């Protein structure tokens, strides 16, 4: 987990950097997409370590809550 955590930090940093460069026109959208994919892969690895099904349930709960909030705004 120690090595994977370090890699997660690194990938998140690379994503932040790519987004900042994209906003300034220094990289293309594909560079951001690549970094998003890397972060998602690392997050899935972390989910497996901490409890994949627990993470999936939490995602569902949060999406449901977000959907409810959006529906209230749109009424």
Image (cartoon, helix red, strand yellow):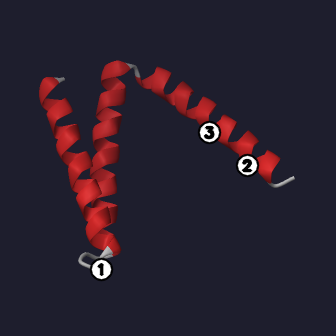
* Mark whose residue sits in front, 1 or 3: 1
**Up/down of 30 relative to 4, above or below:** below
Q: Quadrant of residue 61?
A: top right
Counting residues from the start of the chain, the first of labels 1 and 3 encountered is 1
Left or right: residue 66 versus residue 28 is right
Marks 1 and 3, how far apart at CA? 32 Å
Residue at mark 2 to residue at mark 1: CA–CA distance: 32 Å
Does residue 42 lie above or below 37 as drawn? above
**Disc 3, SS:** helix
Splitting the image into 4 quarters, where does residue 50 fall? top left
The residue under the point 26% across, 70% down is 21
Q: Position of residue 62 (x, y in %)?
A: 60, 34
Q: Residue at x 31, y 29 (%)?
A: 46
Give the number of the disc on residue 70.
2
Residue 66 percent location from the top left of the image: 66, 41
Q: Earlier in the sequence, mark 2 or mark 1?
A: 1
Badge 1: few (under 14), some or many (20 or more) residues near its Cα, within 10 Å? few
Disc assigned to residue 62: none
Q: Quick one: label 2 or label 3, which is nearer the N terminus?
A: 3
Kindly identify which residue carries mark 3.
63
């Amino acid at each position: 987990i120690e090595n994977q955590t370090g890699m997660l930090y690194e990938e998140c940093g690379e994503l932040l950097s790519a987004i900042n460069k994209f906003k300034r026109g220094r990289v293309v959208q594909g560079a951001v997409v690549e970094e998003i994919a890397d972060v998602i892969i690392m997050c899935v690895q972390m989910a497996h370590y901490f409890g994949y099904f627990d993470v999936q349930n939490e995602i569902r709960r949060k999406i449901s809550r977000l959907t409810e909030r959006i529906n209230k705004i749109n009424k």
